[in-house]
Image (cartoon, rainbow, N blue to C red):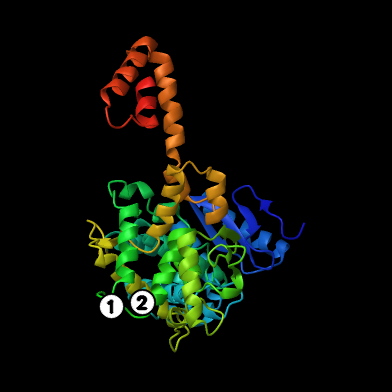
Amino acid sequence: MTGKSVKLDIGTVYKKDEDGPYFFRYQVNGQRKAVSLQTKNQQEAVAKARELVPVVRSTTVDLISAHVKHARGLASARKTLALSDAWDVYSRHPERAMPSTVSERESYHATFNEFVAFVGNPAMGIGNITPDHAEGFANHMREQDIAVDTHNRKIKRLRKVFSVLKDYCDSESPFLAKSLLRKAREEQDNEIRRLSFTREQEEAILQVLSDTTHKVMNKPELRVVYHVGMFTGQRFKDCILLKWDRIDLNRRRIWVKQFKTGKEVTIPIAPKLLDVLVEAQAWKRDNYVCPNVAARYNIIDAQGKNTGNNLVNIDALRVIKWIGLEPSVQVPGRKKKVTVYGFHSLRHSFASHCAEAGVPKAVVLSILGTNSEIVDKFYTHIGEDAQEKAIMALYGGGMSDRAKIDKALELIASCQDKLPTLQELEHILR
């Protein structure tokens, strides 16, 4: 029976982790509490919990006070860990979060430091942090004009840190409450979203990348990067770090193993993309199709953080500004601007053009490599057509079939130089 929960007359003795100590969970005045029993032995844990049962049953202030003292007595045997030392312990713990990027690891540290600064007492033991501290910090962040997703990421990081350092705490993580998280609907009035380029805007981008007027570092290579993104729909990093051994010019195909998802996709090479890839062979010196841009993108600082990706992104945004578009806009309630146009807009454009051309959704997904909301966004017209047909079938369109045919013939007769398009006739006959 070792390790299983034991129900008492009041409360439950249980383990959070197989190798951890037992806890006693109960309710006082309608509020759930949990106290560490400071033992991994089930019999000892049950005995200690039964000593607490009379206290829990009581509603008097004196006995509740006695319970608090008892709980503190149990906690005193636990090793204390000051907030100022907690990160050092966490960063060496085998159960710590292991983000794939140095940037995200630094974000964990920055978020924890932000919480310690909010508490205002680095010497406080991590076991003394309560749900009230967590709620106070969440309310503090609500006043900082940050996005809902940013707020929730910070709460989840702290939730992870405190769960890893559970051996220094008397109860469950203070950051477990769902009320600490913000809801997406809080930003439902924010209509600013990533936009796709029109075909005219894409053509304008290619023109400024080919002229001699506009200047940007490694412009010929950046022109290739934009072509790859435009004609394959792949992400920025996948386009920049594309290698020659993933391209077959004879078969006119590109293979991409996406950095973000790990999925491998294969894409036919469009004629315009083929032309610039053939040109790019003139500067071939290593396996990267765009060696200078790739080297710039891969710049790492002394702490091991990638800083080059931001440099290349700035170059890419400069191109977008050349055609008169503003990449970011200010949004009420946020300190940082929201990006509306960026290199990633090409991925949206690719899905949009595929939808307009009637390319099956499954085919688009096989190229983009994910069940992306981007694809769903541009394939809603399929559902809209079905909805329109359903409404018309139920309530009619106010015009008989004979009238529709007469109107179509009238349109054809009125066109002297150019016959109406199939879309125009279809619209009338519907």
Asked whether disc 1 touches disc 2, contact meaning CB atoms under 8 Å apart, the reply is: yes
Q: Is residue 365 left or right of residue 315?
A: right
Q: How many marks?
A: 2
Q: Position of residue 388 (x, y in %)?
A: 40, 25
Q: Secondary structure at mark 1?
A: loop
The disc at residue 215 is: 1
Q: Position of residue 342 (x, y in %)?
A: 35, 63
Give the position of the C terminus as an image quadrant: top left
Where 382 falls versus 289 (above or below)? above
Residue depicted at x 45% and y 62%: 272
Q: Position of residue 54 (x, y in %)?
A: 56, 53
Q: Amino acid at mark 1?
A: Lys
Where 45 falls versus 102 (above or below)? above
The disc at residue 343 is: none
Residue depicted at x 58% and y 62%: 252
Q: Amino acid at mark 2?
A: Lys
Q: CA distance from mark 1 to mark 2?
A: 7 Å
Nearer to me, 170 or 109:
109
Q: Quadrant of residue 25?
A: bottom right
Nearer to me, 185 or 349:
349
Q: Quadrant of residue 286?
A: bottom right
The disc at residue 219 is: 2
Q: Is residue 78 left or right of residue 205?
A: right
